[in-house]
Amino acid sequence: MQIKRILRPAITHKMTSDSQQTGTFFAEYISLFLSGNKAARCLANDLADCGVGLMPLVDHCTLRTLDVDKRAEALFPLGFSQDQTLGVLEFDNWWAKVYRKPGYPTLFVDQAFEGKRGEPSLIPDWVHAHGDQCFHHIAILVEDIEYAIDKMKTRGIEFRGQIVGDPNTDLRQIFTQPEIKKSKAFTVLELIERHNGYQGFLPPQADGLMESSRL
Ligand SMILES: [Fe+2]
């Protein structure tokens, strides 16, 4: 499927250089993501057709890496800073930090724990196969996740596992079936439904979501 519109940062005389770089970063990373993810291409094309575009609906993008702090060094010059309120998010066998820049999608960066605790994690194998210079997933905000799933299924998009998060709670998420590259799981598209201004990433849910991307 062809991508109808390549995302491109707008250039204005008012734009500061870190904002130009941030625009370029998202344009390149999301174009790369779309080229390898059919579900995201389908959605991007539909949103282009109705004139909305994909970017305003991107809640967060996830980078998998072997070293969160080292990977984050490239994000600071773009104007991102770590969300200190959330701190370090710890899960069963992996952990994450969240980086934010007002006006742009949040960046969620994760790695496996060192040693035995991290051994069952999916993340190191994924990074060895695909590197840490591309998004593992982007999350698209939806108003009603069940409705979004039904509509996307009619377009041939398949989902993995169940919705994580109970009805009427502040955060509900689901991953699509992973793309396969080099015979290994590659990218997924996430649908995310948020309420009551909740901007966090509830740890018990994120473990379930992570496991749904295991082949
Ligand atoms: Fe996510």
Image (cartoon, rainbow, N blue to C red):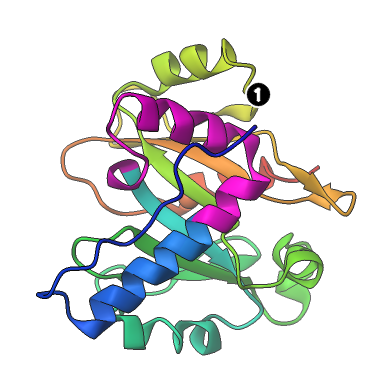
Residue 42 part of the magenta segment: yes
Left/right placement of residue 105 relative to residue 28 reads left
**Image coords of residue 146 (percent x, y):** 43, 17
Quarter of the image where one finds residue 134: bottom right
Q: Secondary structure at mark 1?
A: loop
What secondary structure predominates along the stretch shown in magenta?
Answer: helix
Quarter of the image where one finds residue 113: bottom right
Residue shown at the point (61%, 67%) measured from the top left: 94
Residue placed under numbered mark 1 in the picture: 158
Up/down of 191 relative to 145, above or below: below
Left/right placement of residue 104 relative to residue 139 reads left
Left/right placement of residue 188 relative to residue 88 reads right
Quarter of the image where one finds residue 3: top right
Residue shown at the point (79%, 72%) measured from the top left: 128
In the image, which residues are magenta?
31-57
Residues 1 and 181: in front is 1
Up/down of 112 relative to 72, above or below: above
Disc 1 marks a residue whose amino acid type is Glu
Residue shown at the point (46%, 83%) measured from the top left: 72
Residues 203 and 191: in front is 191
Residue shown at the point (75%, 70%) measured from the top left: 124
**Image coords of residue 152 (percent x, y):** 52, 19
Q: Is mark 1 within 8 Å of ligand 1?
A: no
**Image coords of residue 117 (percent x, y):** 71, 72
